[in-house]
Amino acid sequence: MSIRSVAVLTSGGDSQGMNAAVRAVVRSAVFYGLDVFGVQRGYKGLIQNEIRHMDLRSVGDIIQRGGTILQSARCLEFLTPEGQQQGANVLKDRGIDALIVIGGDGSYQGAEKLHHLGIRTMGLPGTIDNDISFTDRTIGFDTAVSIVVDAINKLRDTMSSHERASIVEVMGRHCGDIALHAGLASGAETILVPEVPFELKEVANRLKENFQKGKRHSIIIVAEGVGSGNDIGNQLQEMSGLEPRVTVLGHIQRGGSPTHNDRILASQLGDFAIRKLLEGESGKACGILKGELTTTDLTTVVTSKKAFDMDLYQLALRLSQ
Ligand code: ADP
Ligand code: F6P
């Protein structure tokens, strides 16, 4: 049976480009003659039936905006079978045939549960962390990396005036992709990520050597998954005798206008999700692999760990001598 209506929600940590994805879902759904609904506050709003009808004008003037007009939330109740059943019941009672979930790994697990409860679901990768398997990029990652690179450009100015080392803590609980990409793009000397073990003593020695080699500053980028930038800064100060300065970029990385890359990715994936639902697919995550739009079973996606790009990591090290 083909679907006649679809709802969309944003869940978990927000990311730039979620609005562009919501816009694409709504406009594509209308284009294909579907009734389309927006769920407020992720799974929390789903359970509480906070669902409104959307039309072409509901998503005007949002492609350029960070955040999410649907708002996002974390919902403990949805972790329980009762909460999940309640979410499925709300959709059935409202006569909504399918649900598109824009979010990260946790949100995907929720979507998988709904799929097993008979709801047709599609996941779209909305997270700055780029930690979702079976997609080369997640929506928001490109913007977050640009923000980090821009911040490091500024830090370099003042660090080189004072011949200092700069420690920059970036987001990425379990995934070092923001640190890796921003580190390579900004010429960081050291990139500390959860995927690659390291000895802080070696980092301290390298830091001293860099100054001895004539470098006027040094950038150490730390993914939050390896520990706090402040702790690492204190330890490096003790080990090296230098006085590094620590910057924690925090939630700044999750705000602001999405880059054109994130807007395009969000637009492609939002439209693709609708077309795949119309073709009868469900329980899938949409992604982009080597430029091709793809769907993969949500179960496969949530049970696989994203591979870390060691080639890119080695390249960053080679070029930062
Ligand atoms: P993200 O989607 O960014 O990874 P979270 O991990 O916080 O963010 O997950 C967002 C929400 O998804 C959670 O608050 C919860 O409602 C739902 N969720 C997470 N994990 C599960 C799970 N195992 N089963 C069902 N729902 C889940
Ligand atoms: O999942 C994205 C992310 O930005 C992580 O990198 C970070 O640890 C987390 O969200 C913080 O989210 P919040 O402060 O909303 O709990």
Image: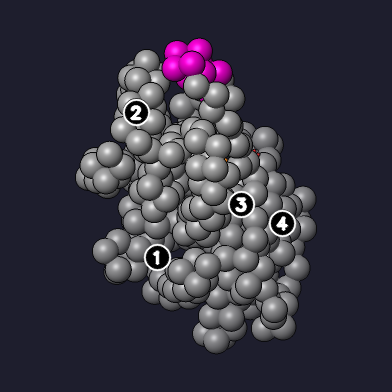
Amino acid beneath label 2: Gln
**Dot 3, how many residues are within 10 Å of its Cα: few (below 14), some (14-19), or many (20+)?**
many
Give the number of marks: 4
Residue 218, horizontal then vertical, whole percent: 43, 36
* Residue, disc 4: 71
**Does residue 297 appear left or right of residue 38 in this picture?**
left
Q: Which mark is residue 212?
A: 2
Q: Residue at x 23, y 42 (%)?
A: 318
Answer yes or no: disc 4 within 8 Å of ligand 2: no
Answer yes or no: disc 3 within 8 Å of ligand 2: yes
Q: Residue at x 54, y 28 (%)?
A: 244
User: Residues in magenta?
Assistant: 233-241
Amino acid beneath label 4: Gln
**Dot 1, how many residues are within 10 Å of its Cα: few (below 14), some (14-19), or many (20+)?**
some
Q: Where 138 falls versus 222 (above or below)?
A: below
Q: Is residue 113 visible?
A: no
Q: Which mark is residue 295?
A: none
Q: Residue at x 59, y 25 (%)?
A: 230
Alpha-carbon span between mark 4 and mark 2: 50 Å
Lower position in the chain sequence, tag 3 or tag 4:
4
Kindly state the secondary structure of the residue where label 1 is placed. Answer: loop
Kindly state the secondary structure of the residue where label 2 is placed. Answer: helix
* Residue, disc 3: 254
Alpha-carbon span between mark 3 and mark 1: 31 Å
Q: Which mark is residue 281?
A: 1
Lower position in the chain sequence, tag 4 or tag 2:
4
